[in-house]
Image (spheres, rainbow, N blue to C red):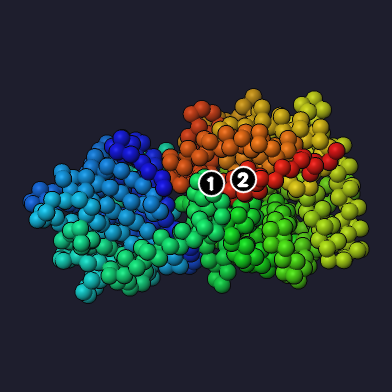
Amino acid sequence: MIQIDRETCSNLDSALSREWLETNGIGGFSSSSITGANTRRYHGLLTAATKPPVGRMVLLSKLEETLVLEGSRFDLGTNQYHGAIHPRGFEFLAGFRLDPFPIFTFEVQDVVLEKSVFMLQSSNTVVVEYRIVNTPQRRTVRLEIRPLIAFRDYHSLTHENGALDPSLQQNPGMLSLRPYEGLPRLYLAHNASQVDPNRDWYRQFFYRVEAERGLDTTEDLFNPALLSFDISKSQPATVIASTEPQRAADSNRMRKAEILRREKIVAAAAMDDPLAQQLALAADQFIAKREDGYTVMAGYPWFTDWGRDTMIALPGLTLPTGRAEIAKGILREFASHVDQGMLPNRFLDAGEAPEFNTVDATLWFFESVRAYLEHTHDETFVRAELYPVLKDIVEWHVRGTRYNIRMLESGLLNAGEKGVQLTWMDARIGDWVVTPRAGKPVEIQALWFNALKIMEDLGTRFHDGEAVKRYRTSSALVQWTFNRLFWNEERSCLYDVVNGGNPDGSIRPNQLLAVSLPYSMLARDRAEKVLQVVEHELLTPYGLRTLSASDPNYKGRYEGNPYQRDSAYHQGTVWPWLIGPFLSAYFKVHGNTPETRQYARGLLSSLEEHLSQGCLGQISEIYDGSVPQLERGCFAQAWSVAQILQVMSEQILSREIRRPSAVPA
């Protein structure tokens, strides 16, 4: 349980910087700050996935609550406007906790009120309950709630307009509206004693995070009704917002079912460690249904499912958490979309054809298959459904596919063409490619070698002798060429990109994959030197910098408008997901011992503390490279959680003492 105390809740800046997230397993979500004030355009009580897991629409932005005690009125909400905070309900906020979902505790005079928020799985439905925890006997307590609706794409903003239809349909315990033709109907189930139609616009809400991001900052929201509740210890107030009819009387059953579901998630992870258990709950929020299968949402609040993110995150999200069947379904689904030997990088929100603009997603696919097979021993599935696809991928890469992706005579893998970013360092501003890495990027060679060795192993398992010979020969050539071309003798590490001319000697974390992946091309002494350089130049308490701070192109702060942020995205910004490969490399070089496990836990201490900052219970996408290292980007990122959970499961919490034999002698 994550708890935030009164002192933090009453400090407006601290409280506004702490966010919470609820998800529904089909791409929809509910999120805001712990004050209830929305600080982003992406905040809202009900962001529905109208075409699961995409088509996200912010339908219900928030609920404005007023507690009425014997004629005295106390606003519990908090809103930020240009130059003003009104009302100041955070001053009544005595605490906030995830238990297991968001619970707000308000203290007003001698009344203690708890508000809870959770979503239903597989449904665009959010349940909001208000319970009196303590009040003097015979005291009359009323609660007034004003729903504020947005009804817009989650990337956009709403402004007062005459096109909105304010019509309400009212039935006992239910009101509904559809303010714009073609959008879903919003149902508000409730147990209010009185409902009064309203037609008011609340104007000029200020979203401070959007101001920090250099984007439009203000929004108008519409209030269609006022709901009044008689509330007591035995009679909570309930509002259920949904795209389908619900019953307020079912809220208690819904609550118990959701608590039980989360208890099962922790139990299935079978890791007696508070950090691992919290990460297992965090991992669950990224798993979503797509049609008849599952996919991985790359990050909240704005990413959907991406091939690269899915393959990097899949083993950590599913295997340590006891969800191998979901991993199997995702591998099967992505295998069905392979085209010209490439995995799709992105499924578009509007349902258009997938984008195939990545070189590394496909290579990470091999590693996800390897991890799945090692965990499940499910050779039947891999042989029948994945092995033929993997063979076809290798053949396409040998003879060449999109974007000049092809194996050269040297055995190395070439990738890229002008104006296209194919690696994970993919920032691009107009025609400017911020980190041009066309040619032979170091991590692509590491992933390519790893893929060939995986295929050699699979061919051996499946008695495919001719294929084994080809993969063994190719991997040996890659290893010989790689060590000859990529070793930077002057810096005792690896070049970042080799492309015919002078190799790129930028100190970046990509070289780490040549050590951390299960199959490494480096001898032990070189692996150790790479690790030392990365540790000295790039390691921070929150992850690895994407560029050494000593580089003239280093940018230590990820802030400002989109141009400024994109230019810093991979030029020094810290990525937590890289802690996973770093620790994997560290264990491989130094062995899995009590001392190395203690070092690893110490390294994770800052990220563990971060679970009570930023988006509570989650790990952010990125951090500033320089102190103070503020969290940036998506407030919850799949591969940040997954890579750390994976290394915790496989190494830190493992009692087996492994020698560093995975690194060639």
Q: Where is residue 576 in the image (x, y as percent from the top left)?
A: 57, 41
Determine the residue positioned at 62% across, 57% down: 319
Quadrant location, the C terminus: top right
Q: Nearer the viewer, residue 66 or 650?
A: 650
Query: Which label's residue is closer to the chain start, 2 or 1?
Result: 1
Q: Nearer the viewer, residue 93 or 272?
A: 272
Q: Nearer the viewer, residue 644 or 431?
A: 644
Residue occupying the far bottom of the picture: 171
Residue 496 placement: quadrant: top right
Q: Position of residue 69 (x, y in %)?
A: 12, 51
Visible in this render: residue 267?
Answer: yes
Give the residue pinned by disc 1. Answer: 273
Proximity of marks 2 and 1: CB atoms separated by less than 8 Å? yes
Q: Where is residue 594 in the image (x, y as percent from the top left)?
A: 66, 36
504 on left or right of 1: right
In the displayed structure, 505 sits above or below 471; it is: above
In the displayed structure, 26 sits above or below 272; it is: below
In the displayed structure, 456 sits above or below 124; it is: above
Residue 578 placement: quadrant: top right
SS class of the residue under badge 1? loop
Determine the residue positioned at 51% across, 50% down: 277
89 on left or right of 533: left
Q: Nearer the viewer, residue 181 or 640?
A: 640
Crowd rating for badge 1 (residues with CA inside 10 Å; few <14, some 14–19, many 20+): few
